[in-house]
Image (cartoon, rainbow, N blue to C red):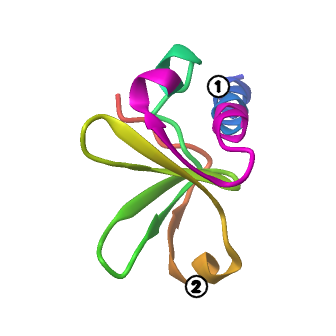
Amino acid sequence: MVNLSINIKLRHNRFVLQHFSPEGKTTLRRKLLQLAGFDFRHFTHLYRTKQGNTYYFCYDYGYFLLEDEKVLIVNWQPYMEQKKVQEVGYKSWN
């Protein structure tokens, strides 16, 4: 039952990211995601750039935490597959 509730959270997170970024790349305030019920503790995998930036993904939508409480939302791209860091069913920061 725990895995089902985690998957529900992950799917909800993906839905929120998709809602705020239908075109695949958007910057917005972190608070908007939180108000929509986004849970930053749950994600499916990570992607690290050459510069060392970490993107957190919920399936095919991901986000990068920017300065000033902003978030960059992106879509998964084929070139990212080579640099995927970790794939997990979920990750909780409790």
Q: Which residue is mark 2?
A: 82
Please, what secondary structure does the residue beneath circle 2 have? helix
Q: Nearer the viewer, mark 2 or mark 1?
A: 2
Mark 1: which amino acid?
Answer: Val
In front of the other: 47 or 26: 26
Neighbour tally class for label 1: few under 14, some 14-19, many 20 plus, Cα within 10 Å? few
How many labels were placed on the picture? 2
Residue 21 drawn at (x, y percent): 66, 43
Instruction: Verify whether residue 17 appears in magenta.
Output: yes
Sequence-wise, which precedes: disc 2 or disc 1?
Answer: 1
Residue 72 drawn at (x, y percent): 47, 49
* Image quadrant occupied by the C terminus: top left
Q: Give the residue displayed 68% in from the left and 55% down from the top.
A: 24
* Image quadrant occupied by the N terminus: top right
C-alpha distance separating marks 2 and 1:
31 Å
Instruction: Verify whether residue 91 appears in magenta.
Output: no
Tag of residue 2? 1
When the figure is inspected, residue 89 is found, relative to residue 83, above or below; the finding is: above
Please, what secondary structure does the residue beneath circle 1 have? helix
In front of the other: 33 or 60: 33
Residue 25 drawn at (x, y percent): 60, 55
Magenta stretch, residue numbers: 15-32
Mark 2: which amino acid?
Answer: Gln
Neighbour tally class for label 2: few under 14, some 14-19, many 20 plus, Cα within 10 Å? few
Quadrant position of residue 31: top left
Q: Give the residue displayed 68% in from the left and 23% down from the top.
A: 5
Do the CB atoms of the residues marked 2 and 1 lie less than 8 Å apart?
A: no
Quadrant position of residue 76: bottom right
Residue 36 drawn at (x, y percent): 59, 18
When the figure is inspected, residue 12 is found, relative to residue 48, above or below; the finding is: above
Q: Is residue 20 left or right of residue 84?
A: right
